[in-house]
Amino acid sequence: MAERTILLAAGGTGGHLFPAEALAHELIARGWRVDLATDDRAGRFSGTFPATEVHMVSAATFGSKNPIALARSFWTIWRGVRQAGAVIARIKPAAVVGFGGYPTLPPLYAATRRGLPTLVHEQNAVMGRANKALAGRVTAIAGGFLGAEGNPYAAKTVVTGNPVRPAVLEAARTPYAEPQPGDVFRLLVFGGSQGAQFFSDAVPAAIALLPADLRERLAVTQQARADDMERVKAAYAGLGVPAEVAPFFNDMAARMASAHLVISRSGASTVSEIAVIGRPALLVPYPYALDHDQAANAAALAAAGGGEVHAQATLSPDRIASLLAGLMNSPSRLAAMAAAARGSGRPDATRLLADLTEAIASGKFKGDKTP
């Protein structure tokens, strides 16, 4: 059993753990044993993770410039490397796969010191700091949006795409319904916990500026923070626009499938899901992201013709109203954007990532960008 083990390393956030979980299910279906190395934040996310064992490994970030804090972080990471080394010596994995975030540093560093086959998966179009630190040491890099341009490790980078949830694959079976003049126009607006406040302020104000004939067609689904929810609901009620407003929707994939237009942030998973389902989107990158990864993710979809990218600073209610009106009056343009988005999607990302994992584990990957 030991020689059929893959060790996955992922930070204790949903964004890093989900693609690891998707890969774990695929590898288990192929007969592998899968273990997970993570940090102590993972408890609330890893309960359903299909690992044979979950190994807690010490980790820290180098975010502080304080020398004492830096020394403490270095010591914590080194302790994590030793812990990860002990795990690796015991379970003898055929390969170690990391998914970004600072908790992946100790297990991947420990694995590369031992000469094990290693892989990092980068969700975004811009490599994060942890993956960047490991990129020169690992066997291969799997990219969600990461291509050859500006990538010094292009020779060992394989664009697999980002794994998406089963609900997204199911939603992708729904073809885009080109909105006809006079039809209800379904608008989906979401931004995540950090981004929803801007949309809560700007989108209802923009809809208030639409011509009455367009406003009367709208049906809105909008994610809003709990603190904003009641005022957003009241704004739409005052406009006579039917709206479902909530902090979270369990069926977001189905709502995306039924939408005629999406307005959203552009995190890697969001852009991947929009592409796989194939819906036109106005993407507003979160402006305070450290690596400007959301802007790069959005640019990738826009380059394919599947969306438009608009900086938050440029989006007054008047501007949003103008963009909305233009698209609502151009159903053929919306349909073309939907088709382009779908054409850029990678519904088979999980399979491709598993293929690459098996290729490095078997020694068949030669850095030629093919699993």
Image: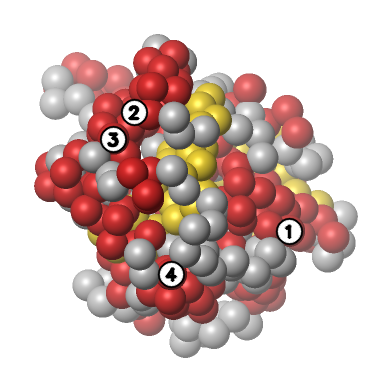
Badge 3 amino acid: Ala
Badge 2 amino acid: Ser
Q: Residues within 10 Å of mark 4 (few under 14, many from 20)?
A: some
Q: Name the residue located 41 percent from the left edge and 18 percent from the top edge.
A: 234
Q: Residues within 10 Å of mark 2 (few under 14, many from 20)?
A: many
Evaluate whether residue 99 shows in this view. Answer: no
Q: Secondary structure at mark 4?
A: helix
Residue 223: percent from the left, percent from the top?
47, 32
In the image, taking residue 292 as reference, residue 162 lies left or right, namely: right
| Alpha carbon distance from label 4 to label 2 | 26 Å
Q: Nearer the viewer, mark 2 or mark 3?
A: 3
Q: Residues within 10 Å of mark 1 (few under 14, many from 20)?
A: few
Q: Secondary structure at mark 3?
A: helix
Going from N to C along the chain, the mark reached first, 2 or 3, is: 2
**Residue ID for mark 4:** 331
In-front residue for pair 324/362: 324
Q: Name the residue located 40 percent from the left edge and 37 percent from the top edge.
A: 191
Evaluate whether residue 258 shows in this view. Answer: yes
| Alpha carbon distance from label 3 to label 1 | 34 Å
